[in-house]
Amino acid sequence: MNTHLSRLRKRLRGDDGALSLEAMILLPVLILVVCLIIAFGRIQAAGNVVDTAARNAARAASLERSGGAGSAAGTRVARNALSQQGLPCTSVAVSISTSGFAARLGDPSVTTATVSCTVRLSDIGMPGLPGSKTLTSHFTSPIDTYRQRN
């Protein structure tokens, strides 16, 4: 009888199955951490692409001779930069400030590009994460002071 009792005590105090239980508790936490890393990585990468698109758009607009041509060139360059980088924006907005083209020859002026892109996050599948995030970037580029303007 004493032998049966000692075997029963050993079985009750044993660690059999503890590793499986710990893994089942930690697995959801690990999955949430991985989902957060993916979400933050996607937002950071998209932010860099939107910054590049705004910088390229402002520069392209500043090289033109008129506000209309600057706006068209900046918008075209921004959209090309977003598509070449493979950023899947659900909506894109590009705005080019062309008031600097109205400045007199010799007066310093600038043009500003604003690019907004809405990035989808719903496919990550993490509870509590918003379905999308809108990233916006502004960049200002000087217009050549002595360049002829139309």
Image: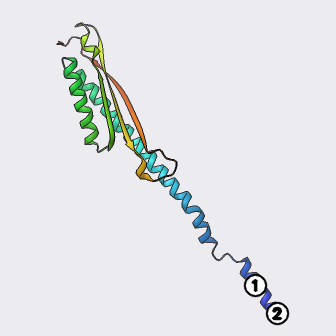
At label 1, counting other C-alpha atoms closer than 10 Å, the crowd grade (few under 14, some 14-19, many 20 or more) is few
- Residue 133, located in which quarter of the rendered image? top left
Which part of the image, by quadrant, shows the C terminus?
top left
Q: Earlier in the sequence, mark 1 or mark 2?
A: 2
27 and 91: which is toward the camera:
91
Q: Quick check: 62 above or below 8? A: above
142 sits left or right of 68 in the view:
right
The residue located at (21%, 27%) in the rendering is 73
Residue designated by label 2? 1
Tell me the CA gap for discs 1 and 2. Answer: 11 Å
Task: Label 1: state its secondary structure.
Answer: helix
The residue located at (30%, 17%) in the rendering is 110
- Residue 112, located in which quarter of the rendered image? top left
Residue 41 location (% of width, % of height):
43, 46
Residue 38 location (% of width, % of height):
44, 50
Residue type indicated by callout 2: Met
Residue 53 location (% of width, % of height):
30, 33
Q: Quick check: 63 above or below 24? A: above
69 sits left or right of 87 in the view:
left
Residue 78 location (% of width, % of height):
27, 33
Residue designated by label 1? 8
Residue sitting at the far bottom: 1
Which part of the image, by quadrant, shows the N terminus?
bottom right
The residue located at (52%, 48%) in the rendering is 128
Residue type indicated by callout 1: Leu
At label 2, counting other C-alpha atoms closer than 10 Å, the crowd grade (few under 14, some 14-19, many 20 or more) is few
Q: Is mark 1 in CB contact (under 8 Å) with mark 2? A: no
Callout count: 2
- Residue 97, located in which quarter of the rendered image? top left
140 and 94: which is toward the camera:
94
147 and 54: which is toward the camera:
54
